[in-house]
Image: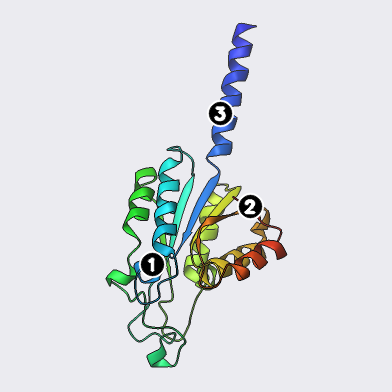
Amino acid sequence: MKNLILFVMALLMNTAVMAQSSKMLLIVDAQYDFINGSLAVNGAPSTMQALADYIKQQPKDAYQQIVLTSDFHPYNHSSFKDNGGMWPVHCVQYTHGAAIFQPVIDAVHEKQPEAVVLTKGEKIPVDEYSIMANSVSAKKLLKLIKQNKITEIEVAGLCGDYCVGNTIKDLVAKGYGQNIVVLKKYIGNIDDGTVLNGIIKDNNLKVK
C-alpha cells in the first residue's frame, strides 16, 4: 500500500512538472530602437524592465521554450521614410538599435541559455510586423510549438498595436487562440492600448 501511494505521488509530481513545462514565453521585438531609440514607444523602458523582472521571478523550469523575435532590417529597407515607407530608420542589422534590451536578454539567459531568437524584416521590399509573416521564422516557431508540445504561449513585448498584435492574430489564425496568454502589463503600445484590447476581445484571449 505504501509503495502504491509513493507511486501515485511520484506520478502526480511528474504530471505537474510536465504541465508546468509546456509553456512558451514569446517576447516580441524588445529592441533598443523601440525602447529609447529612433522609434521609441512611450513607457517602453519601464515596461521592458518590468518584463525582465517578471522573467526573473519565474521558476527555473517555468518555460519549456523561450523565443524572442527581432526586427532585422537592411539599411535600405522599404519601411523607412527615406525609401518611401512610414517609419524612421530602425533596427538596422548589427547596430545597437537592433539589439535586444540587455535586462531582458540577461533574464532570459538566466532561465534558458538556449533561448531562440527569430528574425524578420530582412527582405528589402517586405515589411513584416508579425514573426509569422517571415516564412522561415514562422516555420521554426511552429516547429518549436509542436516539438515541445506547448499548451500555453505567453506573449509580451513591443508593440501591441503592430508587431505584438499582428503576431497574436497570426497565431490565432493558425489555431492557437486557446493557447495564448497576453501579458498586458509587459506590452508597450504606440496608441493607448485600444488596438491590443480589440484583438484580445475579438479573439476571446486570456490575459495575465
Q: Residue at x 54, y 46 (%)?
A: 23
Task: Tell me if mark 2 has few (under 14), some (14-19) or many (20+) residues whose alpha carbon lies within 10 angstroms of its own.
Answer: some
Image coordinates for residue 159, horizontal then vertical, percent? 50, 68
**Foreground pick, 1 / 59:** 59
Q: Looking at the image, is mark 1 or mark 3 earlier in the sequence?
A: 3
Indicate which disc, 3 or 2, sits on the residue closer to the N terminus.
3
Label 3: which secondary element: helix
Q: Position of residue 140 (x, y in %)?
A: 49, 61
Q: Inspect the image, locate mark 1, and give the three-letter code of the amino acid beneath it.
A: Ile
Mark 2 element type: helix
**Residue located beneath label 2 in the image:** 179
- The disc labelled 3 sits on which kind of residue? Asn
Residue 172 lies, in percent from the top left, at 65, 63
Q: Split into 4 quadrants, where in the image is the N terminus? A: top right
* Residue corresponding to mark 1: 35
Quarter where residue 18 is shown: top right
At horizontal 34% and vertical 54% (from top left) the residue drawn is 103
Which sits in the foreground, 44 or 140? Answer: 44
Question: Image quadrant of residue 201?
Answer: bottom right
The residue wearing badge 3 is: 14
Image depth: mark 1 or mark 3 in front: 1
Q: CA distance from mark 3 to mark 2?
A: 21 Å
